[in-house]
Amino acid sequence: MGVAAVGSGLLAACKNAESKQQNTATDTPTGEMTMRVNHNTGDQVSLLGFGMMRLPVVAGGTARENPDSPIDQQAVNEMIDYAISNGVNYYDTSPAYCQGLSEQSTGIALSRYPRKSYYIATKLSNFSPDTWSREESQAMFERSLEYLRTDYIDYLLLHSVGGSSREKNSLETFNGRYMDNGILDWLVEQKKKGRIRNLGFSYHGDVAIFDMLLRWHDEGKYHWDFVQIELNYLDWNYADEINPRNTDAVYLYDELEKRNIPAVIMEPLLGGRLAKQPEAITARFRQKDPTASMARWAFRFAGTPDGVLSVLSGMTYLEHLQENVQTYSPLKPLSDDEWDFMLQMAHEIYGLKAVPCTACNYCMPCPYGLNIPAIFSHYNKCISEDALPQYGSEDQREYQRLRRAFLVGYDRSVPRLRQADHCIGCGHCLSHCPQRIDIPVEMKKIDRFVERLKQS
């Protein structure tokens, strides 16, 4: 997978930000950022990590919504200024993020500060078989150093282990990406040379791969300085219930905790799903704490376990950064009662049966033009807002209102030629989904649901 060259729009926006974002009465943190210590290196790491995968673009929104628009470097610089001034020092990127431009943008923004004032995490994102060769994988690592304007990486991850390519199963894919080409041993050599300070992996999917890598750690074959896992209050006990190909976060976290391996957390909001829930759910949270947003509850949950080194948030807008900084400045850990309350809420949310899509966009582009994340997003949004029309409802007026709203919203959110009825079940998307969703099956379900609405 080649990385796109820096676009002219990005280069034009590469001016240093002169002015820093000023705190207001509403966004001033209540105290200093909570820091966690990485016992491998002594690093004092901010509990809030900045995920550089949803950076703003000039046309508005992110590269996912507007893939042809350049990154708004000025906005990125301003967010980094605010983050650093409020103690955020962990920045997570990848060659695969933001149409291949995240590392360049991150390097531009961070290089305005002393190198030892922040930690860079990036990944060996050699997903495509044409990047599996030793030469291509090494070249990807070298480009990361160049784009990030540094001569070492603080936290280097094998990206999304446990998935599979379209042609191979997860173990064969792992071996093809990291073992057969000798690239894992090469990365260990780079760590010895000081070009990598911490070596770890991000995990998605096949738990047998996760267990194998930890067994290697136990046997001394490879040492993992940290591991990135998906953890939120819904996935704590229900990840494998929502999707049998996933693994409950409680198991992943406990296995790392046993070995004293620091955990970096991704998807604390499950792709934004946990930030907005039906009124019946949000009312229960408001009753518990009238001042806290759904996002704040989720971030407190993710940050409470002691073995968590940093919680990543892919932030596009300054207000999201401000709220997350507030939540962790300092963190107020959940009490036992609050922890139990959130697990009970997870049980109720699980009953909604939404598609576990986090809108990571790895499934795109679809060779047949479907906008897979947008289709799932509209469907899940209607579930979370308790606005999904229920076929056979006794209240026909309400059913017709919801039916029309769903269909109109569907057409507005997803162009007709990119909707679920155009899925032919080719399976091209399956190997790319970190959540291991059976996308063609879900597309057929949604298509049948939409057709029934149209005919009723």
Image (cartoon, helix red, strand yellow):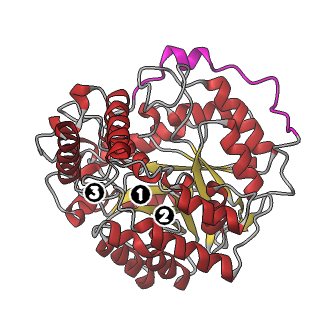
Q: Is residue 7 rendered magenta in the image?
A: yes
* Numbered badge on residue 437: 3
Left or right: 112 as drawn, with respect to 394: right
Q: Do the residues labelled 3 and 2 touch (CB within 8 Å)?
A: no
Q: Is 135 situated above or below 49?
A: above
Label 1: element kind: strand
In this view, the residue in front, 103 or 364, is 364
The span shown in magenta is 4-24
Q: What crowding class fits label 1: few (fewer than 14 Cα within 10 Å), some (14-19), or many (20 or more)?
A: many
- Amino acid type at circle 1 is Leu
Label 2: element kind: strand
Q: Distance between the residues labelled 2 and 1?
A: 6 Å
Image location of residue 437, percent across then percent down: 27, 57
Q: What crowding class fits label 2: few (fewer than 14 Cα within 10 Å), some (14-19), or many (20 or more)?
A: many
Prevailing SS of the magenta stretch: loop
Q: How far apart are marks 3 and 2 (CA)?
A: 25 Å
In this view, the residue in front, 409 or 63, is 409
In this view, the residue in front, 289 or 309, is 289
Left or right: 145 as drawn, with respect to 178: right
Q: Do the residues labelled 2 and 1 touch (CB within 8 Å)?
A: yes
Residue indicated by mark 1? 158
Q: How far apart are marks 3 and 1 (CA)?
A: 21 Å
Q: Residue at x 59, y 24 (%)?
A: 72
- Amino acid type at circle 2 is Gly
Can you tell which of label 3 and label 2 is closer to the viewer? Answer: 3
Q: Which residue is drawn at 33% across and 35% down?
A: 404
